[in-house]
Image (cartoon, rainbow, N blue to C red):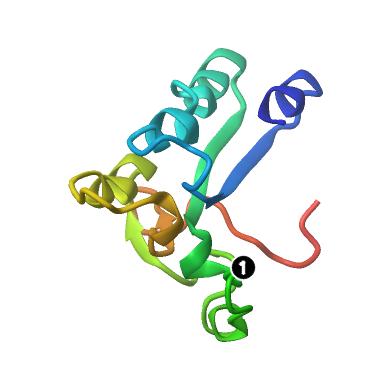
Amino acid sequence: MIDKCAELNFNRVKVHALLDGRDVERGRRLIILFHRGKTQKISSEKGLDYAIASGGGRMKVTMDRYNSDWNIVKRDGMPCPRKGRKFRSASDAVKPLQGRSKATDQYLPAFVITDDSGMPNGTIKDGMP
């Protein structure tokens, strides 16, 4: 999808990643999330603004599939720039899980990636073009 956006020359793409972890080998989350630096590579090579903006594990930021826990949705919803711990990079956001032996991506708390001033690098707003 990111490649197609770049092919169509979309100027700005911010990824709000919902991580699962059940169908992904533990420890591969960074490879998949960054796809070897895809957003950074597109930004630098094509002069576009592509980045990971926020994310989190599905069991923490969306309704879980086991108990249909709507309270998760009411409390957090999909990660958005006003919710979640702030990090300077998506790598920093997911590193805390890597040291936990049984932790999977689906339990990653919501995170927001910020710029140097602490402002979210991608927002979800009504009326965005």
Label 1: which residue? 65
State the residue in front, 102 or 116: 102
Residue 62: x %, y % from top left? 58, 69
Q: Is residue 76 above or below residue 23?
A: below
Q: Secondary structure at mark 1?
A: loop
Residue 41: x %, y % from top left? 50, 19
The residue positioned 36% from the left and 39% from the top of the image is: 26
**Residue 96 appears left or right of 31:** left
Q: Amino acid at mark 1?
A: Arg
State the residue in front, 35 or 121: 35
Instruction: Specify whether residue 81 is in view.
Output: no
The single residue placed furthest to the top in the displayed view is: 45
The residue positioned 23% from the left and 51% from the top of the image is: 96
The single residue placed furthest to the left in the displayed view is: 99
Q: Quadrant of the N terminus?
A: top right
Residue 80: x %, y % from top left? 55, 64
Figure label count: 1
The residue positioned 21% from the left and 48% from the top of the image is: 101
Instruction: Examine the image and state in which quarter residue 48 appears.
Output: top right
Q: Is residue 37 above or below residue 111?
A: above
The residue positioned 69% from the left and 65% from the top of the image is: 125
State the residue in front, 10 or 112: 112
Neighbours of disc 1 within 10 Å: few (<14), some (14-19), many (20+) = few
Q: Is residue 63 above or below residue 48?
A: below
